[in-house]
Amino acid sequence: MRAFAFIAAIALLVPALPAAAQRSTGPAPAPALPGPSGIGPSLGRASDAIRDGRRSGELSRGEAKRARRERGQIDTLADRYSADGYLSASERREIETRAEVLRATVNAERLRGDTKRR
């Protein structure tokens, strides 16, 4: 089931890759958006799902640890993208998408219903 959740997460991210690689000769890109504000709610929902799953016993210690590590990687990416004080629209979408995929993966693991939890 973990493999299914991972494959589902990848399936959500893969369609965006070809579009990100295309160069446009059209109008100038939209201006960058200031700072990482607005990303907090997405990451907060992922953190809430991890915490709630661990407290209820729906996530094992290992699953919660993996999810927290992924959340940390998303935080690091957001910090790197916003190092100049701005996030482009595509950078913001990527961070938000990763956070939502993490939240969905954690919720799927919680609903899986294994009885072997610690």
Image (tube, grey):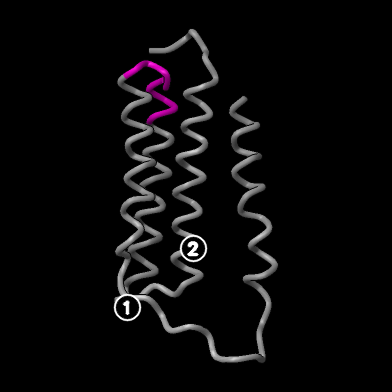
Instruction: Identify whether 54 is placed above or below 41.
Output: above
Magenta-span inclusion, residue 62: yes
Which residue lies at the image location 42% right of the left edge and 22% below the top edge? 59
Q: Nearer the viewer, residue 81 or 48?
A: 48
Residue in the picture at 37% in, 76% down: 33
Q: Is residue 46 magenta?
A: no
Mark whose residue sits in front, 1 or 2: 2
Q: Which mark is residue 84?
A: 1
Q: CA distance from mark 1 to mark 2?
A: 17 Å
26 vs 40, left or right, is right
Quarter of the C terminus within the rendering? top left
* Placement of the N terminus among the 4 image quadrants: top right
Residue 93 image label: 2
Q: Which image quadrant is residue 75 in?
A: bottom left
Q: Is residue 17 above or below residue 11?
A: below
Q: Amino acid at mark 2?
A: Arg
Q: Residues within 10 Å of mark 2 (few under 14, many from 20)?
A: some
- Magenta stretch in the rendered image: 56-64
